[in-house]
Amino acid sequence: MRTVDVAVIGAGFAGLSAAHALRDGGAKVLVLEAQDVAGGRVKTIVHDDGLAYEKGGQFYCRDMTNIAGLVEAYGLTRRDVRKEPGVVAMLGGKRKVLERDFLEHHFFEKIFKADPHRPGSLGNWVRSLGLDAEAVAMIESGCEEVLGRPIEELSFRSTLECLSKFESFENTMEYCCAEGLGTLAGLMAKELGDGFQANAPVSAVGRKDGLFHLATPIGTVAAKEIVYAASPVVLRRIDWRAPQDEWLKRHPNRFVAGKMRKIVLRYGKPFWRGSDFGWLGQTDSPSGLSVMDASNVEGTLNVLAVFCGGTAAVAMDGLPDDAILAKVMNIIEPMLGPQVRQPVTVVQTNWTDHPWVGGGYATWARPWETEDPWSPMRQPHDGLHFTGAELAPAFPGFIEGAVRAGRDVAARMLQRR
């Protein structure tokens, strides 16, 4: 049996950041990761063309100082993302050119003026606004692409609280990491040495003689404290055996994870440049699908990223990759033209119902009436601590938020020692 001061469950950026901060503070730490690599909802692959592709989260901006600092500290390369003016939309089957994306038309300007204590779903609130059918469709599609679920399933109050913690909405997709943020996660895990263990899902947690006992494929791990750094919906994969932890068996039912499929398309030439397609294309059918220019500003890497969230992800569930690609091409060709069907490289990833991260890219509270589902996870429970991108003090749901959340929980733990 291995004994440590702190066992960290999950090696996404929240778990890795917590582990580094705790180790630097003098704690003996072991990070237990269920997947074969670190990164959580961030994953980088190197394709046959020799280029790094982000299969999960990838974007950050100048206001996201923590992730920007890590990219620089580990000697990786910041890549500026090209963003030219213009948004093309398919609304009611008709192609339109917009100045702003779907959520900038009505959603943001209205939600920050709303009653923050309003109960019920995000969908109920949207319907109360008295907007026309096209505006409602834009909000629904924009939300499903970002949040990954139909707005009827999401808490209005929790969504507003999340958005209120953003320091800036200005160009959050300003930068990428050329080598991939999954590469960064791997470097952070490697630096932990034997304090990181992949392929080590925690199947049960008990308490005995003042220590937590975690059952894993590498044997029992005993720890004075635990940092749970995975999605709340994944709590159900662990058998919480101590009486004081019984609530964790029911708590996952109060959350839903985003349904998301990401498709990256690389082209030899940026055929869309100079057209009315600036940087983004969106559609209301299926709701939740968008395509954006994720190329570098130099024009040496020409990439479109297609995000299928919520309804769009469900519509593709169970289909083979070639059928999904054909379906997506039928949707985005009216926005971009027939040349979109000629990518050099295609990388597809399905995050929907992912066993170890729940889904992509974030977890959301269901509508609640009396108790915020996040509330009990913001405080320790006899040595059990929670962190994650959704619990971040700023930029929740983003990689930046995950880093801040991990460092935040570590600082609180070290302060109590």
Image (cartoon, grey):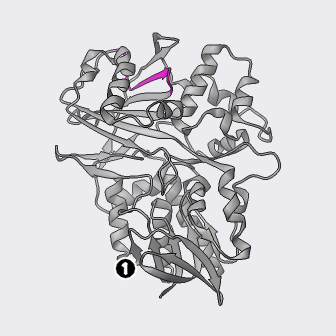
Label 1 Cα neighbours within 10 Å, binned few <14 / some 14-19 / many ≥20? few
Coordinates of residue 71 in the picture (x, y in percent):
35, 57
**Residue drawn 50% across and 36% down?**
170
**Residue drawn 44% across and 28% down?**
290
The part of the image, by quadrant, that contains residue 129 is: top right
Coordinates of residue 19 in the picture (x, y in percent):
48, 72
**Residue drawn 48% across and 18% down?**
99
> Is residue 306 on the magenta stretch?
no
Coordinates of residue 306 in the picture (x, y in percent):
38, 32
Q: Which residue is mark 1?
A: 194
Q: Of residues 313 and 165, which is closer to you in this image?
A: 313
Please indicate whether residue 134 sits to the left or right of residue 339 in the image. Answer: right
- The residue most toward the bottom is 209
**In which quadrant is the C terminus drawn?**
bottom right
Q: Which residues are magenta?
A: 276-287
Type of amino acid at the residue the image marks with label 1: Asp
Coordinates of residue 405 in the picture (x, y in percent):
56, 60
Please indicate whether residue 249 sits to the left or right of residue 103 in the image. Answer: right
Task: Please tell me whether residue 249 is drawn above or below residue 225 in the rendered image.
Answer: above
Q: Of residues 345 and 318, which is closer to you in this image?
A: 318
